[in-house]
Image: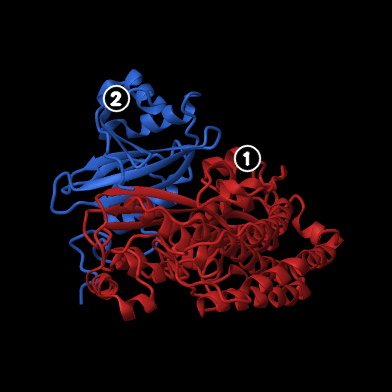
Amino acid sequence: MAHLTPTPVLDPAQDRTMILNMGPQHPSTHGVLRVLLEIDGETVVRIMPDIGFLHTGIEKTCEAKFYQQVVPLTDRIDYLCPMTNNLCYALAVEKLLGLQIPPKAQWMRVLMNELTRINSHLVWLGTHALDIGAMTVFLYCFREREEVLRLFEAVSGQRMMTSYFRIGGIALEPPLDFFDRVRHFAGYFPDKVDEYENLLTGNPIWMMRTKGVARMTSEDAIALGASGPTLRGSGVDFDLRRDMPYSGYENFKFKVPVMQDGDVFTRYMCRVAELRESIAIVKQALEGMPEGPIKADAPGVVLPDREKMKTQMEALIYHFKIITEGFAVPEGEVYQAVESPRGEMGYYVVSDGTAKPYRVHMRAACLANLQTLPKMCEGGLIADVVAAIGSIDIVLGEIDR
Amino acid sequence: MPPAGAISDLEQLKGHPAVGRLLAWNAASVAGVKFDRDEMTIYVDRPYIREACAILRDDPSCAFNFLSDVTCVDWFPAEPRFEVVYHLLSISKKERVRLKVKLDGVSPVVESVTSVWPGANYFEREVFDLFGIRFSGHPYLVRLLMPEDWEGYPLRKDYPVEGYR
């Protein structure tokens, strides 16, 4: 919304309250979130998030691109979990097309998706702890995150904007040593999670800053549209991976961490437990990785192999047609939701039968989660606002789109 | 595998709990149904949307207690031009349903569902911001993403991708 006038919306009811502006360049707002606080001494009377500083009109841009050209845009929505967005968009378009994805591509997607979750949660844990004053955890988390980013680079050539999942499969075969590297990472990573927990979970300062802070009941969480760890930290047992499985998640066994108290500490505990569960899924994916093709057998939709293009005329023609004209997608609409590290990431794709999407809408988990902030913070202290913002794990790229 | 054809016959889809419940409440509220690619769409007549949402949320056989998303599609130059789209989720039954309200292009107004789900607040503000749909009864309907002095509604189809220069 980016208000030009500083405080048009909050009206101090009495003389003793004052308006405090926090952000958009405040380091604890994780990007460009601006928060207007009406405070009475140290107590927050009202809080109002102000967003829109990163709005780039991605949904409008999507309407002018071919279906396959939208994939790189989806990376840029939530830059901490690019593959989750790739996956969600690819699944939506595949559902529109009625495409069947080969098992190896599905398992690779699950594997990469869980690595993405680890990557995202590590950034969250590091910055969240940094906000509350625990500097060391940040350095530890980024040490492990670096290895995950190297794995991303190995499969896709990119550290962050991977665009690795394509409509109909994945872009490339993983390199030969990739699975060994993932296995090595999955072997030592649980010890590192222990290390983070040693620094935080039992730490009296951490507990004082997080336990009983920014509480939210399960009823409020549902009514406000919260999802992901923000919802499960309030005691609602719902995870799309388990309850409405997609991309072969029904083949994996994992626990969904749920905690009852609905404060900053339970949201923290849920995410840390998810780190361990993600590693369990990664290990299962490594063990059961099927052999076979990584792309669906759909010549008009999936780009042909380079080798085939050099020897087969049809492959060259299809390549040329896909690049220059795109491919028509049957009329219809789908809503595909996946469990992103932050909650329910949904893509609503409408097709009018042409090669460009008629409408692409992203349901951003953070946008809904951000609405819980007033519920959490009003009546609390200013310092707890920082803890609350960290605990809902916002990414402004996704909120503003 | 080609997608199976869409079913839009009300008689065939009466068995769906949400459709059945809305028909039992007020047959005039259901303007149409569609079942396509395993997804259920119910077209709700404009005056009934808020009550329909409340009924679907509270009825134990439906229990659509979670509002996933509110968005809009512009079918310019067709009339009625706008479709406001609500995605409902039942956490207990693990099911989704999509509600749609058609609005004309001259004065697109629909009742807000913020009284049913407070979480609709930002979603409706976003639709107002980018499509210019007004939600009556919304507690604070101002632009969410664009600057407050912005002219026009960027996601409308008659708004150029490059913007006005």
Q: Position of residue A333 (x, y in %)?
A: 31, 48
Report the side of A309 relative to A236 (left or right).
left
Label 1 resides on the chain identified as: A
Query: In the structure shown, which secondary structural element does the residue marked by tag 2 occupy?
Result: loop
Q: Where is residue A162 in the image (x, y as percent from the top left)?
A: 49, 73
Q: Position of residue B89 (x, y in %)?
A: 47, 39
The quarter of the rendered structure image containing the N terminus of chain A is bottom left
Query: Which of the two residues, A276 or A287, is positioned nearer the viewer here?
Result: A287
Report the side of A78 relative to A137 (left or right).
left
Report the side of A135 relative to A51 (left or right).
right
**Res B140 seen here:** no
Three-letter amino acid code of the residue under disc 2: Gln
Instruction: Give the drawing colour for chain A.
Output: red
Question: Where does label 2 land, which residue?
Answer: B12
**In the image, is residue A306 above or below residue A343?**
below
In the picture as drawn, the residue positioned furthest to the front comes out as: A311
Report the side of B68 relative to B108 (left or right).
right
Query: In the structure shown, which secondary structural element does the residue marked by tag 1 occupy?
Result: helix
**In the image, is residue A266 above or below residue B102?**
below
Label 1, residues with CA under 10 Å away: few <14, some 14-19, many ≥20: many
Residue beneath the point at 30% across and 50% down: B72
3D distance between C-alphas at marks 1 and 2: 37 Å
Residue beneath the point at 49% across and 75% down: A161
**Res B83 seen here:** yes
In the picture as drawn, the residue positioned furthest to the top comes out as: B24
Q: Are both tags, 1 and 2, on one chain?
A: no
Query: Which of the two residues, B119 or A194, is positioned nearer the viewer here?
Result: A194
The quarter holding residue A159 reads bottom right
Q: Position of residue B67 (x, y in %)?
A: 46, 42
Instruction: Give the drawing colour for chain B.
Output: blue
Question: Where does label 1 land, which residue?
Answer: A218
